Amino acid sequence: MHSSKHERRRISSKLADATLTTGGTPDGLDYSPVAMMPDVRVLKIGGQSVMDRGREALFPILEEVTAAKDKHKLLLCCGGGTRARHIYSVASDLELPTGVLAALGGYVPRQNARMLQMLLAKHGGLFILHDDFEKLPLYFRLGCIPIMTGMPPFGYWEKPTQGGRIPEHRTDAGVFLTAEVLGAKRAIFVKDENGLYTDDPKKNKNAQHIPRITAKELLERDLPDLVVERVVLEYMQRSRFCTEIQIVNGLEKGQLTRALEGEDVGTVITRE
Amino acid sequence: MSKLVTGDGRTHIESSLMRESLVDRRVVAKTDSEGEFAILPDVVLVGLGGQSIFDRGRAAVMPLVEELKTLREARKAGKKGPPPMVLGVGGGTRVRHTVSVALDLGIPTGGVAQLVGAMEEANAVFLNALLAKHGSIVMQREHFWELPLYLESGMLPIVISIPPYHFWEPPPEDGPLPTHGSDFGLFIHAEVLGMKKLIFVKDEDGLFDKDPKRHADAKHIPRITLGELSKNMPDELIIDRQLFVCWQRARHVEQVQIVNGLVPGQLTKALAGEPVGTVITRH
């Protein structure tokens, strides 16, 4: 049937003969994943919702961050905002592929992370790249506040988006995946609203606040718009560690601090 | 497109996406269009199997090195030579060993994804050592936009096949294994650059309805469409499943061909457009 003149030189292992493309847990494997740094608080600082508001919104948030930094290990991840929207708009007009949009969109959260670093430098703010991720234990041990882009490193390797061009994995997804690989149970998103509402509170004054909801319920409602990137809710269905995300209002003094203490302020989205 | 807009506490730049929620399907739909700009449409991506070719050593690799050398010379000679090529190579048995040890240790999926790329890169270095005098060069990810330079100067670029999902590998739908492997990585690399064709060089004559190494009665599939294949996906596949999932929403790749690298000349024929091995078409 096949012309194997020369054998494959194999290292024997439980997976040596397995088809890796079928999914599932390989036979004879008892997989129980290790949480790398479950006590890290992964925080997303919103782009449009916080950074684009400038000093008035950001400085009080940074005060809360510096006040909490000796008590908690804080990893700050930045969103993009209006400049990312401008990039996606121009790139879509030019009919460029999603992967190019993802690579280009990555520049803006990186700028925002660098701005945060400059503002937090005197408190140990440290701009880090994806490649520095393995040095997190050192940064925390030194009492630093590592700051990175929220964007995952997919860039040109981002999958094409169905029915549009905007990459599906942006800074919400990156922050969630960061928490997941660190083994943290919850990721915190700092935005400019108290979380989730029945309608857009910026447009509808009667919109009601939803303090707690499951990702499954949100997906089942099949809403055209969501409070976080769709893939985050999908990944929450099958993640091993990060099963909750919390959206807090950074404009309301003290909310972030309470969230860091574990209080369910804002909106908590759980898996089930 | 450069007007600044304020008044709601935020500073916006005027654009069609200003103030919009990028999660909103209606907003996302505004960024869609029929066409898409193809960056390097005439280039063909050739992926050499890790386990299927590289792990067989000299006997399997050297004839392919010779074939690639001849192809490159034909291309340099001009006329109607083969199309410009970009090479990629899988990681093979060392990837499996890495994954096996890592899963036993309880390394999280993202951690496993971070590890496996090293084995693929090692094979890229192997291939480059053998092809260097014929103009190959390992293209590091940071040098993404140097690809036209390499191609224009007649070189044989070797790209890193594993996609840079690393620690950020999304949770798999089933089980702990990362799903974005080297076949998928090469596919997405070709797709983002607007390439129309990929050729995977493996140790079988292409796709079979089951693994021909285990089943003597496995039937060869010479030609199939993506739609037919997706409806009736064999359990054991010679190519990452994720590639086919992603292909459903791709815009550029028209054809994925799988050829037998142990049969001299099959790769050359495939590059000349002959339907050797298995030809999978998008439509």
Image: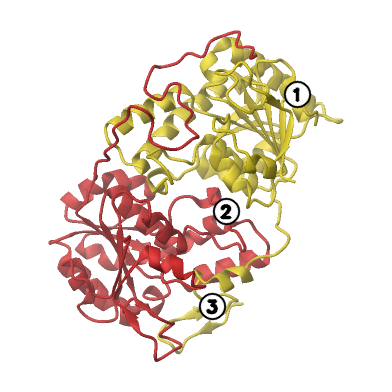
Chain colours: A red, B yellow
Q: Tell which of B120 and B231 is nearer to you.
A: B231
Give the residue pinned by disc 2: A99
Give the residue pinned by disc 1: B268
Q: Tell which of A147 and A216 is nearer to you.
A: A216
Chain identifier of the residue bearing label 1 in the image: B
Give the residue pinned by disc 3: B18
Q: For mark 1, give the secondary structure.
A: helix
Chain identifier of the residue bearing label 2 in the image: A
Q: Are marks 3 and 1 in contact (CB under 8 Å)?
A: no
Asked if marks 3 and 1 fall on the same chain, the answer is yes
Tag 1: amino acid: Thr
Residue at image coords 59%, 30% = B137
Residue at image coords 29%, 30% = B104
| Distance in Å between CA atoms under marks 3 and 1 | 50 Å
Residue at image coords 35%, 78% = A192
Check the image and report above or below for B275 versus A42.
above
**Residue A156 image offset from top left, x and y in percent:** 55, 50
Dot 3 crowding, Cα within 10 Å, few <14, some 14–19, many 20+: some
Residue B30 seen anywhere in this rendered image of the structure: yes
Dot 1 crowding, Cα within 10 Å, few <14, some 14–19, many 20+: some
Q: Tell which of B86 and A7 is nearer to you.
A: A7
User: Farthest bottom residue?
Assistant: A205
Q: Quadrant of the N terminus of chain A?
A: top right
Asked if marks 2 and 1 fall on the same chain, the answer is no
| Residue A101 located left or right of residue A202 | right
